[in-house]
Image (cartoon, rainbow, N blue to C red):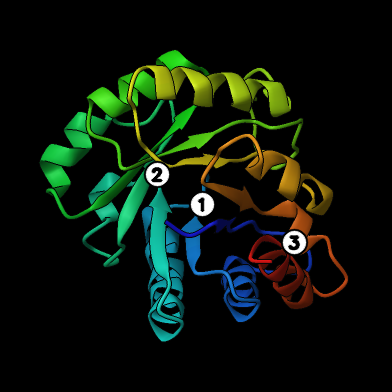
Amino acid sequence: MGEIQFITHYTERYSYVDSARMALEGGCRWVQLRMKDASDEEFIAVAKQVRQLCTEYDATFIIDDRVELVHVVQADGVHLGKNDMPIDEARQLLGPDCIIGGTANTFADVKAHADKGADYIGCGPFRFTTTKQNLSPILGLEGYQQIISQMQAHHINLPVVAIGGVEFDDLQPILATGVSGIALSGTVLRADNPVQEMQRIVSHISE
């Protein structure tokens, strides 16, 4: 489980492929391709390029939502939001070796995903973020601490990745709550030099 995950995001400056390439050049080894409004045709074209980049950098390649395209684009797995296909259904379609992650905002979400066979949890949002629509309630540090302690009490040992508006100065406090990793998008792409920013983030959490 990589400690830093990068979620692609299209901006005026960078394409989805650009954003993935910069994250990988900066040392990130887990990329999730999220293209919510793209057609399957557009998605496949971009996904094949990102797959190639992830192969070159020996990185894990996850796609968002589109279970039916996981094998088409040779992704390592899929991340499923609350309104996407249930995790147990995706598992039946994709088999035991595919990585499947699920979005959670509460301990009840985490337990439901664990019961259905998720490999990891994307838990958030940490704070308000503009890169995601229809935001769930903000968790903050206290929210992560509560969820992690409830998981421990119920012997649920899934990796939890914090997501949602995370900035550089949040990295250590969030990891101190017991989460396994942090997913980033905007904070990297808004930097003057996204490659250097990712390098700074990766080296900071590996100190």
Residue 105 seen in render? no
Q: Is residue 136 left or right of residue 66?
A: right
Residue assigned mark 3: 188
In what quadrant of the picture does the N terminus appear?
bottom left
| Residue lying at 66% horizontally and 59% vertically, measured from the top left | 10
Please name the residue that numbered disc 2 is placed on.
79
Q: Three-letter amino acid code at disc 1?
A: Arg
Q: Is residue 148 above or below residue 30?
A: above
> Between disc 3 and disc 2, whose residue precedes?
2
- Structural distance between the alpha carbons of marks 1 and 3: 15 Å
Of labels 1 and 2, the one closer to you? 2
Residue 34: give its label. 1
Instruction: Say which residue appears at 51% left-offset and 51% top-offset.
Output: 34
Neighbour tally class for label 2: few under 14, some 14-19, many 20 plus, Cα within 10 Å: many
Give the side of residue 79 with respect to residue 68, left or right. right
On the question of residue 186 being in view, the answer is yes
Q: Are marks 1 and 2 in contact (CB under 8 Å)?
A: yes
Q: Secondary structure at mark 3?
A: helix
Identify the amino acid type marked 2. Answer: His
Residue 36 image point, x, y percent = 51, 45
Image coordinates for residue 110, horizontal then vertical, percent = 41, 24
Relative height, residue 157 to residue 111 (above, below): below
Residue at 69% in and 32% down: 126
